[in-house]
Amino acid sequence: MTAFVFPGQGSQYAGMGKDLAENFSQARHAFEEANDALGMDLAKLCFDGPEEDLKLTANTQPAIVTTSIAALRVVQEEAGLVPDYVAGHSLGEYAALVCAGALSFEDAVRTVRQRGNFMQDAVPVGVGTMAAIIGLDAQVVDEVCDEVAQQEVVAPANYNSPGQIVIAGHVAAVERAMALAKERGAKRALPLPVSAPFHCRLMEPAARQLEAVLGEVSVSDLTCPVISNVEATPNRKAGAVRDLLVKQVYSPVRWEESVRTMTAEGVDRFIEIGPGKVLSGLIKRIARGSKIQNIGTVDDLKSF
């Protein structure tokens, strides 16, 4: 069985999607549709940068989704592949839902641009942050966060792979958690260069705003199951999509569990579609022995 997986924020780079758009009309049309949906030249931002503008959350989110869908359309046209399951890391869940037919591409692009604004504005700059904890079990990281919270927010935000967990919350609480994690045996505790503390309770105001936007978005029947970040289980119900996307904003991304769910369902081939190779690296550590490929450039497509 085959799963398509789609990357999230942090995979962006200036130049992404450019060679696909130059070589395939399907990819070029995806960027044109995104430009029209947003009323801005998103294609130029993806192809030429500048990097600083591409890193702005409200730009990053539609840019990554558009590049991912451009690559997906090329894969579908050139290889004729149909996935048995789809999943995406955080933002990537929107591309997965487009792939599964639940969301239209235009609605997804418009929604994630607003999502980016809501998430950026939910917490004043300097109040929240995130950090990667390397080399500790999830249970230990959970306990560390509980011990140091002291009426502030700090909690796991991404369960990425064995021994790689990202935490998020108030700056001081995250710093306390990093220090205690090192005492408990973490190999490393690294602050991340992010503009907001994603996937924790501090994002609840953004979730409420997103809920209103999603209420106006049409959701269609899914053509294949989507493994949701929130539950790490296959969702086949159109009626559950909005609620899962709202909860996703302030809930941890259960990526390791999601991959294990897919392997338990019989998936033995993962194809990462979109910019970068972050998910391929994580899946290698979770599902050893699986066939893993990624497609984000023309060279990737040729080797594929």
Image (spheres, helix red, strand yellow):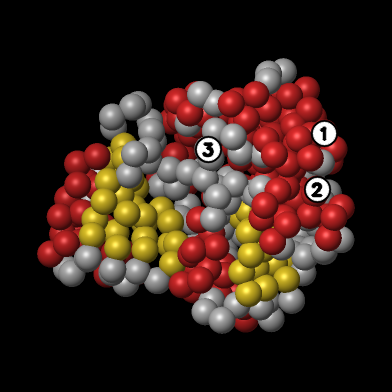
Question: Badge 2 local density, few (<14 within 10 Å), some, or many (20+)?
Answer: many
Q: Residues within 10 Å of mark 3 (few under 14, many from 20)?
A: many
The disc, 1 or 3, on the residue closer to the chain's N-terminal end is 3
Residue 67: where, in percent of width, then height?
A: 67, 40
Tag 1–tag 2 contact (CB < 8 Å): yes
Gap in Å between the C-alphas at discs 1 and 2? 10 Å
Q: Position of residue 140 (x, y in %)?
A: 27, 69
Q: Secondary structure at mark 3?
A: loop
Element at label 1: helix
Mark number, residue 73: 2
Which residue occupies the foreground of this view, 124 or 269? Answer: 269
Image quadrant assignment for residue 163: bottom left
Above or below, 125 against 161 in this view is above
Q: Residue at x 85, y 38 (%)?
A: 25
Above-or-below relation of 93 to 162: above
Q: Which residue is mark 3?
A: 13
Which residue lies under the disc numbered 1?
A: 29
Quadrant of the image containing the N terminus: bottom right
Q: Alpha carbon of mark 2 to alpha carbon of mark 3: how far?
A: 20 Å
Name the kind of residue labelled 3 in the image.
Tyr
At horizontal 66% and vertical 48% (from top left) the residue drawn is: 297
What amino acid type is highlighted by mark number 1?
A: His
Label 3 near label 1: C-beta < 8 Å?
no
Element on which disc 2 rests: helix
Residue under the point 65% across and 24% down: 44
Mark closer to the chain start, 2 or 3: 3
Q: Determine which quarter of the picture holds residue 203.
A: top left
Real-space Cα separation, disc 1 to disc 3, in angstroms:
20 Å
